[in-house]
Every structure is written in C-alpha cells, then in structure tokens.
Image (tube, rainbow, N blue to C red):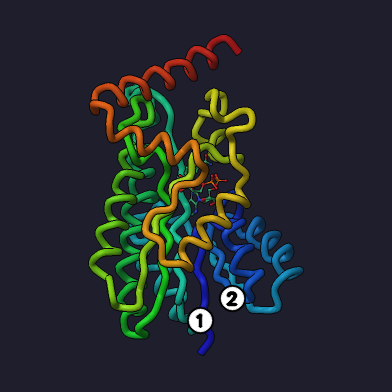
Amino acid sequence: MQSYALVTGASTGIGREIARCFAKDQIPLILVSRQMEMLEKVRFDLMEVSKQPIELISIDLSHPQAAGELCWRTEDLGLEVEYLVNNAGFGNFGNVQDLPEGKDEELLQLNTVTLTGLTERFVSKMLEQGRGRILNVASTAAFQPIPNMAAYAASKAYVLHYSEALAEELRGTGVTVSVLCPGPTATDFGKRAGVEMLPFFEGPLVMTSDRVAREGYLGMLAGKRIIINGRLNQIGTFSNRFSPRWLSCWIAGQLMQSVKRRGQTS
Ligand SMILES: NC(=O)c1ccc[n+]([C@@H]2O[C@H](COP(=O)([O-])OP(=O)(O)OC[C@H]3O[C@@H](n4cnc5c(N)ncnc54)[C@H](OP(=O)(O)O)[C@@H]3O)[C@@H](O)[C@H]2O)c1
C-alpha cells in the first residue's frame, strides 16, 4: 500500500509550498482545504513535478466534527497517511470586545482542537505501522502573549507545547513530531488576519513561503523538534527567555497598537 502525506491548508501559502516539497520527492499527497477550485489549481501545478497520485479533500476544519470526518474520508479512499502536516490556521486581530462573536472560538477550533483531533487519530495508525512523521505549524507568536491577537498567540503556544510533549512521549516509537515556528511570511495570512500593515510584514525581514516550507520539511524529515525560521526569529524567541513576561507582553502590545494607528491613518 502506498503511503501518503496529508497537508491541511494546502490551497495557498506555506501549506501549498510544503505540499510542493513532498511532490518534488515523489511522495503521494492528500491536499486539504475548504476551496476545491484552489486545490485543483495546486494539483495541476504540482503534477509538473510529481508523477504520484494527488488526492483532494475539501472540508471546513473549523467544525467540531472535522477531524473525525477527515480521518474517515481518507479511510474511505483507502489511503494510508505516513506524513501529517497540520498547517491550516488563521489569526484574528482586534480588541476582544470588537471581534465578531464566535470568531475566536472558530480560530481555536481550527488552530488547536482539529489539530489535536487529527494528530491523535493519525498517530494511532502510525504507531501500528511503526513509522510516521507529524509537522505542526505554530508561529513565533507562540513564545509570548500578544495583546490584540490574544487567542491566536495562545493557540500557537498550545501547538508548540502540545507538539513538544508528544515528541517526547513518542520517543523511540518510529513516529516523530516536529513543530514549525515561522515569523512573518509573505502569504495571505497578514491580510486575512488584518495585520498586513505591521512593520515586520514589510521589507526584507519577511520570509518567503517556499523558504519557510522547505526548512520545515527538511526539519521534519530530520526529526527535529522545534524549527524556528530565520536567524532573527531565532534570536527573538531565545532572548524572550531573559525578559520578564510582563515586558515581552507589553512590547508585543505596543507593536499591535502601532498597527492600529497605521490602520487609522491609511
Ligand atoms: N504567514 C505568516 O506570517 C505566518 C507566521 C507564522 C505562522 N503562520 C501559520 O502558518 C499556517 C499557514 O498560514 P499561511 O501563512 O500559509 O496563510 P494562508 O495563505 O492564509 O493559508 C491558510 C491555509 O489554511 C486554510 N484554511 C483556513 N481556514 C480553514 C478552514 N476553516 N478549514 C480548512 N482549511 C482552512 C486555507 O485554505 P482555504 O481558505 O482554501 O480553506 C489556506 O490553505 C497557519 O497555521 C498560520 O497561523 C503564518
């Protein structure tokens, strides 16, 4: 039986580029997102570099039953998943009282609950096979609280801690868990979250999605636990350890206030 790589959020951005890495290595793929048309375009593109099967599943992963349904749909297609990439996610920017009702619940459902549900379901199957690799996409936002993106940063802290703990729990089983922590990356994320005018979403510090994806992919293959993209992000997340928690939270809050001011003047 052929083994597949399942990538959530594969229609755009980092997920699409991670899918490209698997395609180049001739690993069969299951691409997942809500938009079937976008997935079809991605498959068309990837067929230039891969001769392997590429299956598409359109599903809204922010629904409470989504993990179970996605797992069941792969079983129904008779597909065995050896690589799981939990990449789909989004951010909300704004004061808690100004966010649309339920938007942070939707975020938590997608960024944490579905990620957990998919991980536990596929881990069991990987353990039966004695092999498997999981790559969870967190963020540098996982390393400190961020006012005005409170639920997003907290959701990524969850992904970071959950992945590290599982990696330790699964040590020696043949199944590895890696967590990718990108900083600002040129994708639709900033626009969708409403933070594209943040100072570090412009200029040379922004990384490309293909570089972020490639580093994540290679780190996952090497069984690395935490992959932080770019030297500056590595320094930033490391230096956080030496700052009082209230200070890093205050600095993050000041940056977010600058986004608001820019939004008001533009
Ligand atoms: N870009 C950055 O600066 C940055 C930095 C750190 C971490 N990250 C993380 O990287 C991951 C990928 O983000 P990106 O930057 O590539 O953003 P993106 O271009 O907006 O891609 C997000 C992907 O998630 C999918 N998605 C969103 N909601 C979904 C839902 N309810 N059900 C199923 N799929 C859904 C989208 O597909 P559809 O719309 O087709 O459903 C899309 O494929 C996210 O977890 C994000 O938090 C991004």
What label does residue 27 carry, if any? Answer: 2
Which image quadrant for residue 263?
top right
Q: Few, some or many C-alpha atoms within 10 Å of disc 2 (few <14, some 14-19, many ≥20)? A: many
Please tell me how crowded label 1 is: few (under 14), some (14-19), or many (20+) other residues with Cα within 10 Å: some
Name the residue: 31% across, 44% down. Answer: 157
Reply above or below: 246 against 169. above
The residue pinned by badge 1 equals 3
Q: Is 44 on the left-hand or right-hand side of 175?
A: right
| Amino acid at circle 2 | Ile
SS type, badge 1: strand
Q: Is residue 152 left or right of residue 233?
A: left
| Mark 1–mark 2 distance (CA, rounded to whole Å) | 8 Å
Quarter holding residue 143: top left
Pointer 1 and pointer 2: residues touching (CB < 8 Å)? yes
Where residue 249 sits in the image (x, y, percent)?
30, 25
Which mark is drawn over residue 126?
Answer: none
Quarter of the image that includes the C terminus: top right
Depth check, front residue: 34 or 238: 238
Question: In the image, what residue occupies the spot 31% across and 54% down?
Answer: 113
Q: Mark 1 or mark 2: which comes first in sequence?
A: 1
Q: Disc 2 on helix, strand or loop?
A: loop
Please indicate whether residue 189 sits to the left or right of residue 119 in the image: right
In the image, 95 versus 141, the foreground residue is 141
Residue 242 sits above or below residue 37 on the image: above
Q: Amino acid at mark 1?
A: Ser
Where in the figure is residue 222, as x and y percent of width and height? 46, 67
Q: Is residue 27 left or right of residue 66?
A: right
Residue plotted at (28% across, 35% down): 241
CB of mark 1 near ligand 1 (< 8 Å)? no
**257 or 64, nearer to the observer:** 257
- Location of residue 55 with respect to 12 vertically, above or below: below
Q: Position of residue 30 (x, y in %)?
A: 55, 70
